[in-house]
Image (spheres, helix red, strand yellow):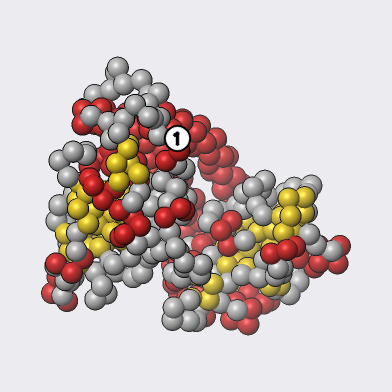
Amino acid sequence: MIRASTFSDKWPIVKLGDVVNFLDHKRVPITKSDRTPGEYQYYGANGSQGTINDFIFDEPLVLLAEDGGNFGHETRTIAYIARGKYWVNNHAHVLQPKDCIDLDYLCRVLERYDVTPFVKGATRAKLSKTDASRIPIPLPPLETQKQIAAVLEKADQLRKDCQKMEQELNSLAQSVFIEMFGDPVTNPKGWTIKPLVELLNKPLQNGAYYPKEDYCEDGVEMVHMSDVFYDFVERGNMKRVKVSKKDIAKYKLTSNDILISRRSLMLEGAAKPSLVQESGEDLIFESSIIRLTPDTKQVNIMYLFYYLSNPKAKQHYVYQYITGATIKGINQTNLEKVEILVPDMEVQNSFLERESIIRNQKNDLKKLKIETDTNFNSLMQKAFNGELNLDNAKT
């Protein structure tokens, strides 16, 4: 994260409100006739596109998350450059840089800015226009700004390339899934279909809830909703809680389990599956998650994970059991009803072998992503404390 305390003292520090214009969302309201599919991109920190609170812009501008949301969960990004024709909802500030500050430089300063000192609200953090205007911004000469932005863009491109490769590997794994098992909706290979409840090794289990005072540094790691964005739960950096041996036995996770998210603001996030890596250290899970332990004599874990992750399978078999208007969710009773195609175990095991090759490639890529992220973060820090070597930068 970028913090004002790290900024170089060799450049003037100005307030955000001095170098940008905050554009009024209401200057160009969207009408139904404006919502031509594919014509406009959509940006907003939270909310759904195409609402009465969305407005059209057609010039490159910086968007700054306002209503406690992020443009990307993985990077915790709070700023983004929007280009072309696009919708913006009222959960994002729209910033038009003045002549003294470069558009790309401004975005680089803000994209990972620690805005904690400027947000208000206990339940839902909000960054108001007034408070956003007070954010300190280092203002080197315009040419230096462009050089800094160019260096960071090159480093960021490496990160983007890794993300693209990861997406391609994920698509490859799903392609192998379809190749081996067929379309899960039409079921061309005639696999047996069973409700999930008939494929369980033990009953579904909701996670535990503990008050804040039970959290501690030397407790047992506990999976929260913020930990289940990826295929595998990442060990080592999760919150820890003081729990009894009885609770450990009840809520313990192993590599034989699949975690299912119970609720989400977005439909795609409800009933999202995640896997658990084998570890010698205990791991439990919180109440917004359901533990699913399949009967591996009928389905292997990796097959079931990919099935529950497949967009067509989710659309046809899962979404009908998700309820809620504002918060989308699934309970144990409905999850048990989800129909699962059950291929022959021989085919499932063959898929596991092919998937493991792709997974190894993803693990290698993960190491590369860590390196590129570390390098990018280091450059970000050097850029704004005046230590970045700009001799070879091109504008």
Tag 1 residue: 6
Out of 82 and 357, give the one closest to the viewer.
82
Taking the view exactly as shown, the residue that stands out farthest to the top is 391
> Element type at marker 1?
helix
Q: Residue at x 33, y 55 (%)?
A: 132
Q: Is residue 337 visible?
A: no
Point out residue 18 in the picture as x, y percentages from the top left corner: 23, 47
Compared across the picture, whether 144 is left or right of 170 comes to: left
The answer to whether 160 is drawn above or below residue 88 in the figure is above
Point out residue 177 in the picture as x, y percentages from the top left corner: 50, 56
Out of 305 and 299, give the one closest to the viewer.
305
Q: Is residue 330 visible?
A: yes
The answer to whether 305 is drawn above or below residue 5 in the figure is below
Amino acid identity at mark 1:
Thr
Q: Residue at x 38, y 60 (%)?
A: 127
Point out residue 258 in the picture as x, y percentages from the top left corner: 65, 62
Q: How many marks?
A: 1
Point out residue 230 in the picture as x, y percentages from the top left corner: 54, 53
**On the rendered image, what quadrant is the C terminus found in?**
top left
Q: Residue at x 38, y 52 (%)?
A: 78
Q: Residue at x 84, y 64 (%)?
A: 244
The answer to whether 339 is drawn above or below residue 103 in the figure is below
